[in-house]
Amino acid sequence: MIVEELIDAIEIPFRYVVVTESTPIREIIEDMIAGRDDRVVYVVDGNNRLEGIISLGDLVRHYRADRIPRRGSWFPSAGMLRYLTAETAGDIMKKKFVSCRSGDDVEDVLSRMVSRDIMIKVIPVLDEEGRIVAALDILDILKNFSR
């Protein structure tokens, strides 16, 4: 089965939060709270092409950065400094991310999602221009395999 077929088979509509690099972090959190089921925010450019991803964990690290213990140094690491000083989506988004296309094999997509050190729970589906057309939750994929 390919991703496009899985998308057609899913009965619930796709919902995902899309922002630009200049969106304030406070607004991103409000959007995520309103969505409730969203674990990821997608950062797009002016042509709606995916530029980066912000996870729920990134947002928590932003708000907890001043409370995270530092290992052996009184000065925060470069990674933590980024979270401490962040004000917009562009400041904390990850520019390297895993995505898939409509024609990709679903089993290959699942392998990509679980082949990392940290399991990816949601993967964006991009068109030929790099625009997001859907977001597949790992549960959507697993539900397909259980049928």
Image (cartoon, rainbow, N blue to C red):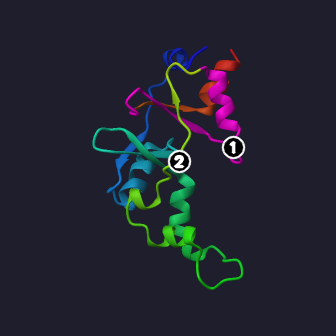
SS for tag 2?
A: loop
Q: Residue most toward the left? A: 46
Residue under the point 50% across and 67% down: 83
**Residue sitting farthest toward the bottom:** 74
Q: Position of residue 136 (x, y in %)?
A: 54, 31
Q: How far across and how far down the image is residue 111, in percent?
A: 69, 31
Q: Is residue 43 left or right of residue 143?
A: left
Which residue is painted at 50% across and 17% down in the image? Answer: 4
In the image, residue 111 lies in the stretch drawn in magenta: yes
Q: Amino acid at mark 1?
A: Arg
The quarter holding residue 141 reads top right
Residue where numbered disc 1 is placed: 116
Disc number at residue 13? none
Q: Say if 21 sits above or below 127 in the image.
A: below
Compare marks 1 and 2 and give the one earlier in the sequence: 2
Q: Is residue 86 above or below residue 103?
A: below
**Disc 1 to disc 2, how far (Cα)?**
13 Å
State the extent of the magenta-drawn residues as a range: 105-131
Tell me the quadrant of the picture where the N terminus can be found: top right
Badge number at residue 96: 2
Horizontally, residue 22 falls left or right of residue 5, namely left
